[in-house]
Image (cartoon, rainbow, N blue to C red):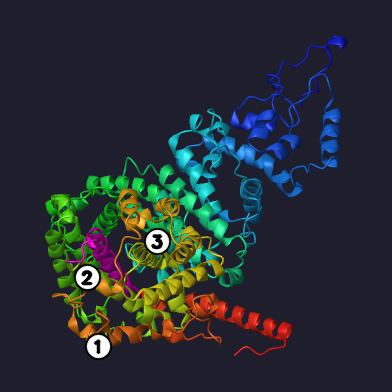
Amino acid sequence: MSTPPSTPGNGTVAVQKSRKPPKRKPLSCLPCRQHKLRCDRQIPCGTCSRYRREDVCRLHPAPPKGKSRRVAAQHVGSSAVSGTEPFPQSHTVETAPFQATNNAQASRAPEQRSEQLVGHVHMKSAVQAINSTLATQTGSVLSHGQDPIGPSDPIVLFPQILPLLQLPSADVDTCTLLSTVDTISQKLRWKTLLVNLLPSRTQSDILFSYFVEHINWIFHTVHIPSFRKEYAQLWDGRVEDIDLIWLSLLFSIISLAALYVPVNAVEFVGLQGDTIRQQADLWHHASLQALQAGNYESKPNLTQLQTFSVTQLYWYATNNIEILNSRMAQAIRHAQMIGLDKDTVTSRNVEDEMRHRLWWDLVDSDTFQSICLERPPLIQVRFTNVPLPLNCNDIDIGSNFVHPKSMEEPTSMSLNIQRARIFQIINKVLVSDPLQFKSFNAISELDRQLLDIMEKLPWYFQLEADGRGKQFPASYDFLSWQHHILRTCVSTQRIRMYRPFLADRTNTAWTNCLVAVEDAMAVYRTLRENKSVGMRQKFFPQAYQVFSVAVTMVTMLLVERSMPHFTRFKRDIEAMTADLGLVDEQACPVPVAVNGRKVLLKMLALLEQGCSPEDAEGLVPNISSVIGGENTTRAYLGRRGLQESPSQVPLSDVTPQHQPRQQFSQNHEVNGVLQNEELTSAFEPIAQIAPDDETSLMPFPEPSDFSFDFDDFQLSDTYDLFGWDMTGLLSGAVASANNSQRLRTEEETGTVIL
């Protein structure tokens, strides 16, 4: 047994031991040491103040010069007394393990890192730490409503969160984590951060279900069965295994759903109704950040094109058309890099079909924007031979099979096929010879081709004998909205083409424009009579389409003061303007609906009081993207007030040669103006509404009873991946909230609302 060493003073030889070098005394606060930033040793230091880490800095300050730690501790205590709260005690215990974990993970090989499950990342402590950081930027703490289910995760506090929160670039220090760790560690940090920004699984389920039921039918570029399998695997998988590009698609889906989902419904799953719209913006930027972290620019793939396709609806809703066009050019280039424009073989599996869907979605979007913004198309369809998408539902295609259906059988892709045929024709004209749009004969020929497509549409996209849109069962109500998109798309384009020729009353431009206006409103009048919750929810993502039709019509009324049926068309516009108010009522801060409604109200006011040159110039920035560019809009508004009286307008043929004649029967002439009894009767419900009584114009009434019918849940039976579809919960939540509001109103007023 060895004896303890004696001190040198006793004359004994001290036992020699290997001595560790003395620890280096830290000269910076803990956050600055952790991020390798310069520290001025103040409490809090200037660097931590810039990055909003004052609480952590006060808790672990730099050792003061010439003062004891006791004095420093008193300084921290005094700052708390003065009104500045220190870092929460619940986070204090986690900070030290986090430092050790970070240092260990930075030096450890990727395969040696501890496994971290996605589901376990959603710990209350981690979420609170991130939310406390977000609260300083957004002004509210975003609650995830989820209890901890495992050991606490590390607090993610590093400079890379700053670009995601859109802080000014001057606040981002050049010495960041990106210069100190390898690429794999960078991606792992991003994955951990982004997973923390996801809502809980239950909350994600309801947002995803809302997207599938009420939004995906518009472009349908996400194959739902495949996505749901990957979605189910996400929550049980490891953070390290997450595909950042796929995660960007998920964020895009839930952000778009969060724009429109009923506030009452999300409160059932723990999301705060008063912050869900702000979270939509946060998740939208998380989607963009996931794309960047996934290095999408150098390695394009189909998933990132799906993200673009979904996100363009977000940009339309928030009126970010310039961002949309910038990202569209990039998406088209990436599509060409992976050879979507080189496909020539009909789909044999789901990957082939998604390539064709995404390519034609890009063609449609590019051609539409080229019309609206007076620019040439980026895609030239005449040089490609890509097959059109197949007429099939998602369950009809898989990894090794395709089962297309006849066009006489409606599917979720029926709209996209017909829309692609229409834009294919327009694209060829725009690319081959744009000057054709200045020739009336060339316009008439293009119009003939468009009407030929419309006449040969399948039965479910045809109007009834009385000129109204067909109605479908609840499980197929998306067909009515697809029919609405199809007719408004063609009708507004016909009006754009003929608008420059309306000054010449000797041609048929007036006749064709009037027929196009009537056709644009035919399906919408039928949709306004449907009172189901599902129909109303599908209206909200279509706000841009409704706004476009209303702007097109009211601009014609402003300029063509002698336009026949002026009063009826004006009441149509008032109805659509009131409909856009429903979006605002649901607390959706969608500029195209909120601000667009203000623009329409202003234009309606100008119809009454007159439109001065200054008023017309003020309208140009707000409506040019619909009319066809600023130059076109400015030129057309300059013609206002120069028209003849209605009695001088010759309308000799309201049924053009290629217009379905069964829709426009029983024509007769009154005071030189051709009238139509069937068209007039279609407007009668609107014509009885007082223009000043805005509340009476509201369509899509709230349901009067609580409905929960499993027969409406087609998705869960189709894909068999969720036991039930949460769309029913959405309907029930809205109905329950409306009944509660109705009871409160009766108690307050003492009246009974029928």
Does the magenta segment cover residue 730?
no
Circles 3, 2 touching at the beta carbon (< 8 Å): no
Q: Any mark on residue 683, and which?
A: none
Residue 652 lies, in percent from the top left, at 18, 76
Residue at point 35%, 45% (across, down): 326
* Residue 720 seen by the camera: no
Packing grade of label 2 (10 A; few <14, some 14-19, many >=20) is many
Q: In the rendered image, is residue 482 in sight?
A: yes
* Structural crowding at the residue carrying mark 1, measured as other residues with C-alpha within 10 Å and reported as few (<14), some (14–19) or many (≥20): some
Quadrant of the drawing holding the N terminus: top right
Tell me where residue 155 appears, x and y as whole percent. Answer: 62, 45
The amino acid type, in three-letter code, at marker 1 is Ala
Using the image as rendered, state which of residue 418 and residue 91 is in the foreground: 418
Q: Going 16% across and 57% down the picture, which residue do you hit?
A: 386
At 49% across and 42% down in the image, what residue appears?
Answer: 112
- Seen in the image, is 442 located left or right of residue 402? left
Residue that badge 3 annotates: 230
Find residue 512 and name its label: 2
Query: Crowding at label 3, few (<14), some or many (≥20) Cα neighbours within 10 Å?
Result: few
Mark 3, secondary structure of its residue: helix
State the image coordinates of residue 540 (x, y, percent, origin top left): 45, 69
Q: Nearer the viewer, residue 702 or 252?
A: 702
Which is nearer the N-term, disc 2 or disc 1? 1
**Image: magenta residue range:** 481-506
Image spot of residue 654 (x, y percent): 21, 77
CA distance for labels 3 and 2: 49 Å
Describe the element under mark 1 as helix, strand or loop. loop
**Amino acid type at mark 2:** Asn
Residue corresponding to mark 1: 465
Q: Amino acid at mark 3?
A: Glu
* Dot 2 and dot 1 residues touching (CB under 8 Å): no
- Where residue 646 sits, quadrant-wise, is bottom left
